Image: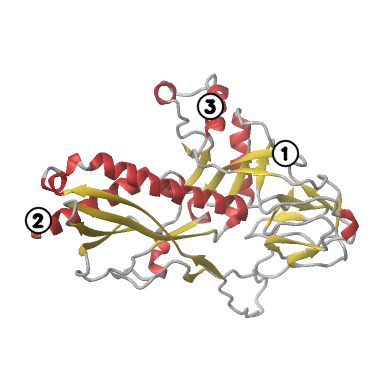
Amino acid sequence: MSNTLATSSLITKDSLRILTNLLGFSKAVNREVQDEFGTQKGGNYSSGATINIRKPPRYTIRTGATLSAQGTTEPTIPITLAQAGVDIQFTSAELTHSLTQLQPKLTAAMATIANQIDLDGLTNAKNTVGNCVGTAGTPPSTAAAVLSVQQKLDEMGAPRDSQRNLILAPNANAALIGGLSGLFNSQSVLDKQYKGGLMVDSLGLSIAMDQNVVTHTNGTQPVAGGTVNGASQTGSTINVNTASITGTIPKGSVITFAGVFAVNPQSRVSTGSLMQFVVTADVAAAATSINISPALTPSGQFQNVTASPANTATVTVFGTASAAYTTNMGFHKDAFALACVPMFLPPSGRGVVAAEQESYEGMSLRMIQFYDGTNDRFVSRFDVLYGWATPYPELAVKLAG
């Protein structure tokens, strides 16, 4: 039994390292928010639990010598935890041999978990990020397309601290390799792209390909058919004229309001580009309002636009009605947060032979092992408990393809 316990601990540690290495999009985001949940081994968290993480406050500038004290508001972002796992089995003979003989099984199991975490993260990104550049339906293939990501991040005040990333769908990866092959790339860069078939870090961005990049399909609403109902509106719900919403607008769609421009989050100076919002709930034909993110805020500490939309201002949907486009994702590391937290560890007995949990680089993995005496095998379940949030959607931008 002691050998089994030792092997279980090694399997858990090795599996967690494999899982961490197999992450794509998830590898490039902020995973330090685990501290908000606590880091004790064998925590009491469960699927469906919601924890809030804090965002730092913002303040407006004072000019002159006269005191102007401001209140402090610390917004919070909810993260709802979801449980995912893979269950496999080892024979007694396998557990008595070298751990390397188990690695093909472990790698396949961890790849399945990593794929689900990445897919959930990129789906969350598609549904929470409003900034969008590129041409819907056309894979990006030029330096200008990549630099438009950088421009948008600059306009939104993203730090230039070598933590900007670009995650590409397979078709965008292929198009960019071909499109940028004739530029002034170093021989080493060209060699890596030629041999690996993958875009490498270029134009100030850490670039990777992820097969889980999500495709968004627009609804039937005409691109510029909607109009605002009432002036001076603010917040996360904007009233629209019912007669102007003749089609559907799915969650994750990007929209703009005529005359409503984005501002730099620190200086509050207009960027010269219309503020883009993401639709946070499906909109049906003849709807009276549209739910959006971020909240439209024309003044104060969290100002993000130059003004509220005027009455009857045009609502424009990015892309083409009923058409699909991939949502390649450019972002600063802090735009997204992935929390992966410890889980409850059951005691030995009642069939449980071993229960192990390991944490590594912001990820936690639990393995529980049961013994099947009839077939002389150990059945192992691997579980992760994780949640996604977008604390700073302004630090991310979709590159449509």
For label 1, count other residues whose C-alpha is less than 10 Å away and answer few (under 14), some (14-19) or many (20+): few
Q: Check the image and report above or below for 9 versus 68.
A: above
Find disc 2 in the rendering and name its residue. Answer: 3
- Determine the CA span between mark 2 and mark 1: 58 Å
Q: Amino acid at mark 1?
A: Ala
Quarter-of-image position of residue 308: bottom right
Quadrant of the rendering where the C terminus is positioned: top right
**In-front residue for pair 85/175:** 85
Find disc 1 in the rendering and name its residue. Answer: 323
- Determine the CA span between mark 3 and mark 2: 48 Å
Q: Amino acid at mark 2?
A: Asn
Q: Check the image and report above or below for 356 versus 89.
A: below
Q: Which residue is found at the position 62% from the left and 60% from the top?
A: 266
Foreground disc of the pair 3, 1? 1
Quadrant of the rendering where the N terminus is positioned: bottom left
Tell me: 39 left or right of 103: right
SS at mark 2?
helix
Tell me whether circle 2 and circle 1 mark residues in contact (CB < 8 Å): no
Badge 3 or badge 1: first in the primary sequence: 3
For label 3, count other residues whose C-alpha is less than 10 Å away and answer few (under 14), some (14-19) or many (20+): some
**In-front residue for pair 299/238:** 238
SS at mark 3?
helix
Find disc 3 in the rendering and name its residue. Answer: 174
Q: Which residue is found at the position 33% from the left and 65% from the top?
A: 342
Tell me whether circle 3 and circle 2 mark residues in contact (CB < 8 Å): no
SS at mark 1?
loop
Question: Residue 363: in sight, yes or no?
Answer: no
Tell me: 305 left or right of 174: right
Q: Check the image and report above or below for 316 versus 2.
A: above
**Please, which residue is most extreme toward the left here?**
2
Q: Amino acid at mark 3?
A: Ala
